[in-house]
Structures are given as C-alpha cells and as structure tokens.
Image (spheres, rainbow, N blue to C red):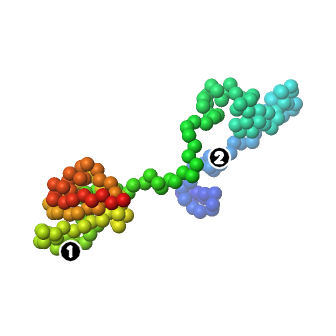
Amino acid sequence: QAILVQASGTTGSFTSHPRLACQEMTARYKKSRHLRGQISNGRGRIGKHRKHPGGCGNSGGQHHHRINFDKYHPGYFGKVGMRNFHLIKHGKVIPAVNVDRLWSLVSEQTRQYYKEKTDKAPVIDVMKAGYMKVTGKGVLPEQAVIVKARYFTKEAEVKIKEAGGVCVLCA
C-alpha cells in the first residue's frame, strides 16, 4: 500500500502513475525537437513567422478582413434605432402587489376590527407600502376595503368590487 503525494504535499489518492499527474507535454516529443536544424522551423522562408501579421484582435474589419466580417458577422458595424439622451432606467419600473396580498399590508387586528364593523371599511394605500399597481392574482376575502393605487388591472378591479370594496386612483 503506497501513500500517494499530491503536488501540494498532502497525502491522498491523486493518481496511480506519477508521470500522468503532470499535464505538460514531454519535451522530447514536441514538434520543435523534430524541427531542430531546419532553418525556418517549418514556418517558411518567404512569408516569415512574424508576431501579428494581420493586426491584433478585430483589426481590419472594414479593410483587409472585410470579407470575413461581411460573411460571418453581418451587421457588426453601424448603428440601429434612436438614441435616448438622459435615459432614466428606473422610470419604467412599476412595483405591483397582488390582490391576495393586499390584507398583508395592514395588521391582522385592523382586519378583525373591520370584519365586525361592516358600516366602515379600511383604507389600504399601496403607495405607502411602496407599490404602484394592484394586479388580480389570488382570492380576496369577502370583506369591504378601499384600495388606493396608481394603477389597477381589470381583474383586480373586478375582484375588489365583488368583495364590496372600492378602487381609488391616486397620482
């Protein structure tokens, strides 16, 4: 039973053969060993093996590499659409709350109080809770409620009115 040693020096089962643990190629099998003595090292006398003969990276896309860019990357150059100076990214965000979560915006004591006092209804201002829109997913308890929001979906409006409530739009 041999204890194998990893590269870091800790014990453990790493691999069975020490030569297989190394990921680099053995030097004597490399192509450069075979090409020793051949003057251009297999790169040719005329063209010469230079550093970046066509330019680095994406250079020449509109010049000497134009055929490749036109063939394999059409539409790479140029613009499309209209520019929007001073784009406000959060301007289109509308936080929404579902109908089934409306009662979680007020305390349970408030819900129980207005359950007994049917002549009054609580006002749930979703704007104060950080929402703008009321959407219609879920079931609303059969209890009258006044909901103030900036936007209502049709389903939400129907469900609130069926429960005996009112939808109030506020800017």
Q: Are marks 1 and 2 in contact (CB under 8 Å)?
A: no
Q: Which residue position is annotated with label 1?
A: 109
Left or right of residue 166: residue 54: right
Front residue of this view, candidates 31 and 56: 56
The amino acid beneath tag 1 is Gln
* Location of residue 151 by image quarter: bottom left
Question: From the viewer's perspective, is 113 left or right of 60?
Answer: left
Taking the image as drawn, is residue 139 in sight?
A: no
Amino acid at pointer 2: Gln
Quadrant of residue 8 within the rendered picture = bottom right
Residue 124 x/y as whole percent: 27, 66
Q: How many marks?
A: 2
Quick one: label 1 or label 2, which is nearer the N terminus?
A: 2
Residue 136 horizontal side relative to residue 38, left or right: left
Identify the secondary structure beneath mark 1: helix
For residue 122, say whether it is visible: yes
Where is mark 2, residue-wise? 23
Hey, which quadrant is residue 80 in on the image? top right
Could you tell whether 7 is left or right of 104 in the image? right
Residue 143 location (% of width, % of height): 15, 63
Badge 1: how crowded within 10 Å, few (<14), some, or many (20+)?
A: few
